[in-house]
Image: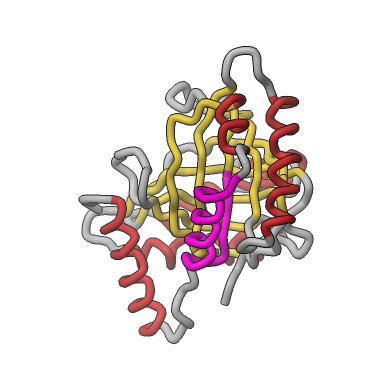
Amino acid sequence: MKKSTRNTLIVAAVSVVAVDSAVAQRPPPSFAAVEGYLCNFTEGKDRKDLDKVVKKWNEWMDESKGAPYSAWILTPVLRSANMPVDVVWLGVWQNGFDMGQGMQAWMTGNDGLAAEFEDVLSCAEHSNAASINIRPPADEWPTATGVVTFSNCSVAEGKTIPEAMDAHRAWAEHLGNIGSKSGVWAFFPGDGASASDWDYKIVTSYADFVAYGAAWEAFTNGQGWAQAQQIMDGTVSCDSSRLYHTTNVRNGGINPAPG
């Protein structure tokens, strides 16, 4: 699928998925607003320094009584050489209205916390995305810590975003059949995202490394790869995943699978 800009991809995703939803008698999709910071620690700083600032930030968030917001710190575990970051900050608002309110509050009255974050982290990218849930995670989500994978996916020539989403829903049904508790989302890149040749990211959550290992076993020795090939072949292709350990630093009560 050929793209022009990130914004046009989001508009296209919203439009065509909505149209597909109407045709298939599914409710229109509800997108959550996601932001991500790709960061490295500044000289002499480490995770302990970041945690100190996060504690202050959480207190500020409580006092400001702003829009609900959930946040995670992601630490790379299995990654490629072209993703040289120490940590990723992943934040989620339920919708664009909350995102706007949250960004406005931060820009106009963060009590110097922005400078404290910048003293600890140097972030090469700050971007947003529109997230749609494909498979709800387990009821206990979000746990204090967990594991998440990100894959870049491209829609085949002549195919559409709705057809790709249907393929991922079919895979999600397969996950249910094998007893998986993983959550699955599609992230459509928006403002600030680096130029690339993929269309969206597939994000999969796991409770811990044991659950990730079980998924790996089911995909390889359990022949899940054959099922995936049958479902995805000719519609969408996704590259190898990057694996991160996650720490939930704020739970704003965001619904992971809005109706």
For this orientation, the residue located farthest to the bottom is: 25
Q: Is residue 59 visible?
A: yes
**Image point 51% across, 60% down: which residue?**
99
Horizontal and vertical percent position of residue 73: 65, 39
For this orientation, the residue located farthest to the top is: 44
Image quadrant in which you'd find residue 147: top right
Q: Is residue 179 left or right of residue 187?
A: right
Name the colour scheme.
Answer: secondary structure
Q: How many marks?
A: 0
Horizontal and vertical percent position of residue 69: 63, 57
- Residue 81, compared with residue 25, is above or below; it is above
The magenta segment is 90-110
Q: Is residue 212 visible?
A: no
Image quadrant in which you'd find residue 13: bottom left
What predominant SS class does the magenta segment belong to? helix
- Residue 166, compared with residue 154, is above or below; it is below
Horizontal and vertical percent position of residue 49: 71, 25
- Residue 165, compared with residue 25, is above or below; it is above
**Image point 44% across, 79% down: which residue?**
28
Please state which of residues 194 and 58 is positioned toward the viewer in this rendering: 58
**Image point 28% across, 53% down: which residue?**
156
In which quadrant of the rendered image does the C terminus lie?
Answer: bottom right
Q: Is residue 103 magenta?
A: yes
Q: Is residue 13 magenta?
A: no
Horizontal and vertical percent position of residue 221: 64, 41
**Image point 59% across, 62% down: which residue?**
174
Please state which of residues 72 and 170 is positioned toward the viewer in this rendering: 72
